[in-house]
Image (spheres, coloured by chain):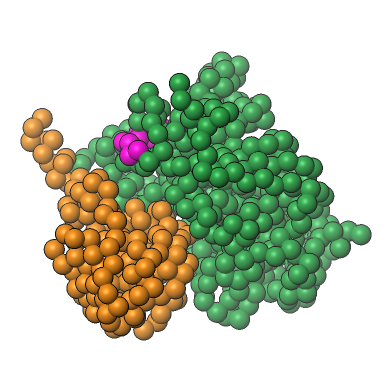
Chain colours: A orange, B green
């Protein structure tokens, strides 16, 4: 499978507060409205211009800070399919897996990708292709791969629990 | 028997395995799984699974703390949905508006114990390392999965060790050490790791001061943090747990001691850091990064409009005492505000009885309802654009307190209180001499 989309490129240490401000975490629940606040305090142009299939490229420690899952779902609801970063904060990484946002750690690709260019992620050969060339990224662990393939933790669990109910 | 870190021992126990190694992925069964104002959205996800009953309601706890008392109808609805869900599912560990912040309340209630695995839908869950528990933050969907199945996959983290020696100088706190460590190593140096603190300077700290360290390690990127429980820990927890269980304190204490886990002396660590605390100074994190900290002397004179003492990091009795001692007989400077929010109702009552609240109010402080207050910009003391806040919290990211056009400095409570009195950032030791 190949994902293709435009790259939105940002720097190091992008934290959850600028991805999805804390003041919205207990009063904004509608997916479309969650998407409207995406990267509000980092790049106010993002939410209005992002298109389905776009990808976000970040530096070190992407998503550090809060455990708020909306920092992932805001990108998913906005149509973003993948995050390519130099490193990803641990709860953000888990939330990304659990919500079907493909988290890829690949520092050389991050350095090479130009903001705004169209890039490809080849999931079968574990390659990122951009104007500057091809970059191999490490595959996800089997357990995280399984969650992403199921569309996220909740869809996976639904299927598992339904199967158990049927068997039991 | 191989040499094991605390994380390896704790997750082996939580997974029901004889032993595990760093890097292994296990299905861990948390002894305590808690959520706060995010309980209601987790409940919606939970029901979407098609599951009717929470698997282990007695292992759950809900606190209402992030926006209390509710500032808007939407927030109030969120609390109402939480109460209804607790009732439907027979969850009895529910802590109402005003009881306080999750990490503090669940510590006071002795719902977390040494050797426990604690999962919380809050990034500061490493907090429970202060009492020797394995605490890790998880997302909302994951919490719904824990409610449904009682377990969650976790990767056993590699560990690093920090050894603290020396005497703590007057005016230097565990918060200053944390800002120093995070600033020295970088805010992502602990990413995915378990961090263990040891050495005489750790065990010389009070309970209130210890709790700061694992809490702040969320800003180091860690999965979990650990301080070995000792007599101080057991003496704190035993009577509280005994009260809860209706059992004699001595028997409860013995059981708590027996459940404690300690790393093997020759366990494998990725790295080891050594700090002589006698060399530390009061530190201040500059906007907008926790890991950009400087000795207070370097930012002396920076004008502030708001000073905030509170949060799960530094809103305990000792912190309110430190603030009260600084402002005693003084007034908050013209053009500045001092906001004090106790971390829990127990802290609040303690501060009332000790006279700290009176001292703080006489100096012109405003006291808020126990909870998170303005820490993440919900309400109750958010800054105006262009304003500068000095806070005893753990995070100073741009926009955190509600507007991206405000600056947040982080410091220990005495520095915060001194800055309120001066109207600019200052070392409290300058005021008292």
Relative image position of residue B8 (x, y in whole percent):
44, 33
Whether residue A144 is visible here, answered yes or no, is: yes
The quarter of the picture where the N terminus of chain B appears is: top left
Residue B110 appears in which quarter of the rendering? top right
Relative image position of residue B121 (x, y in whole percent):
41, 49
Q: Residue at x 10, y 30 (%)?
A: A168
Q: On the rendered structure, is B160 left or right of A87?
A: right
Whether residue B237 is visible here, answered yes or no, is: no
Q: Tag count in the figure?
A: 0
Residue A151 or residue B315, whichever sits in front: A151
**Residue placed farthest to the right in the image?**
B433
Relative image position of residue B6 (x, y in whole percent):
50, 33
- Magenta span has B28? yes
Q: On the rendered structure, is A160 left or right of A59?
A: left
Q: Residue at x 44, y 38 (%)?
A: B118
Q: On the rendered structure, is A10 left or right of A55?
A: right
The quarter of the picture where the C terminus of chain B appears is: bottom right
Q: On the rendered structure, is B82 left or right of B6?
A: left
- Magenta span has B90? no
Residue B253 appears in which quarter of the rendering? top right
**Residue placed farthest to the left in the image?**
A166
Residue A29 or residue B23, whichever sits in front: B23
Q: Residue at x 45, y 29 (%)?
A: B9
Q: Is residue B431 above or below residue B347?
A: below
Residue B295 or residue B104, whichever sits in front: B295
Q: Residue at x 44, y 76 (%)?
A: A42
- The part of the chain drawn in magenta is B24-32
Relative image position of residue B413 (x, y in whole percent):
71, 56
Residue A135 appears in which quarter of the rendering? bottom left
């Amino acid at each position: 499978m190949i994902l293709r989309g435009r790259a939105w490129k940002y720097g190091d240490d992008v934290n959850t507060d600028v991805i999805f401000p804390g003041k919205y975490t207990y009063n904004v629940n509608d997916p479309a409205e969650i998407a409207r606040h995406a990267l509000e305090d980092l790049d106010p142009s993002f939410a209005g211009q992002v298109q389905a299939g776009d990808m976000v490229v970040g530096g070190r420690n992407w998503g550090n800070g809060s455990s708020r899952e909306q920092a992932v779902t805001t990108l998913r609801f906005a149509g973003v399919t993948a995050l390519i970063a130099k490193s990803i904060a641990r709860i953000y990484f888990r939330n990304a897996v659990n919500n079907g946002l493909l988290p890829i750690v690949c520092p050389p690709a991050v350095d090479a990708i130009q903001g705004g260019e169209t890039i490809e992620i080849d999931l079968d050969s574990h390659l990122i292709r951009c104007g500057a060339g091809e970059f191999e990224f490490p595959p996800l662990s089997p357990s995280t791969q399984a969650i992403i393939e199921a569309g996220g933790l909740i869809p996976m669990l639904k299927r598992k629990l339904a199967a158990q109910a049927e068997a039991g | 028997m191989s040499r094991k870190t605390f994380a390896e021992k704790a997750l082996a126990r939580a997974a029901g395995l004889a032993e595990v190694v760093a890097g292994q992925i296990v299905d861990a069964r948390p002894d305590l799984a808690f959520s706060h104002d995010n309980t209601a959205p987790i409940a919606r996800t939970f029901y979407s699974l098609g599951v009717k009953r929470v698997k282990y309601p007695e292992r759950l706890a809900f606190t209402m703390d992030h926006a209390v008392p509710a500032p808007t109808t939407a927030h109030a609805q969120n609390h109402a949905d939480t109460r209804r869900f607790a009732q439907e599912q027979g969850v009895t560990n529910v802590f109402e508006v005003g009881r306080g912040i999750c990490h503090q309340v669940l510590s006071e209630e002795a719902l977390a114990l040494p050797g426990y695995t604690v999962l919380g839908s809050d990034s500061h869950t490493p907090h429970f390392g202060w009492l020797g528990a394995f605490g890790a933050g998880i997302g909302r969907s994951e919490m719904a999965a824990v409610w449904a199945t009682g377990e969650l996959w976790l990767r056993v983290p590699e560990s690093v060790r920090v050894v603290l020696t020396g005497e703590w100088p007057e005016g230097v706190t565990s918060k200053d050490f944390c800002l120093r460590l995070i600033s020295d190593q970088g805010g992502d140096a602990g990413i995915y790791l378990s961090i263990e603190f040891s050495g005489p300077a750790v065990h010389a700290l009070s309970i209130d001061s210890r709790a700061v360290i694992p809490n702040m390690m969320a800003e180091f990127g860690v999965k979990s943090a650990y301080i070995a429980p000792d007599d101080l820990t057991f003496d704190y927890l035993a009577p509280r747990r005994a009260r809860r269980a209706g059992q004699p304190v001595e028997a409860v204490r013995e059981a708590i001691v027996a459940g404690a886990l300690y790393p093997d002396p020759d366990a494998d660590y990725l790295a080891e850091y050594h700090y002589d605390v006698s060399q530390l100074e009061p530190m201040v994190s500059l906007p907008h990064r926790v890991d950009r900290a400087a000795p207070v002397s370097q930012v002396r004179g920076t004008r502030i409009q708001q000073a905030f003492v509170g949060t799960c990091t530094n809103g305990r009795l000792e912190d309110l005492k430190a603030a009260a001692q600084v402002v005693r007989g003084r007034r908050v400077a013209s053009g500045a505000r001092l906001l004090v929010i106790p971390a829990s109702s127990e802290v609040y009552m303690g501060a009332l009885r000790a006279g700290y609240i009176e001292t703080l109010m006489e100096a012109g402080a405003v006291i808020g309802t126990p909870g998170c207050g303005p820490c993440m910009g919900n309400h109750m003391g958010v800054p105006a654009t262009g304003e500068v806040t000095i806070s005893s919290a753990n995070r100073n990211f741009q926009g955190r307190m509600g507007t991206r056009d405000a600056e947040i400095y982080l410091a220990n409570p005495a520095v915060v209180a001194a800055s309120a009195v001066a109207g600019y950032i200052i070392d409290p030791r300058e005021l008292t001499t």
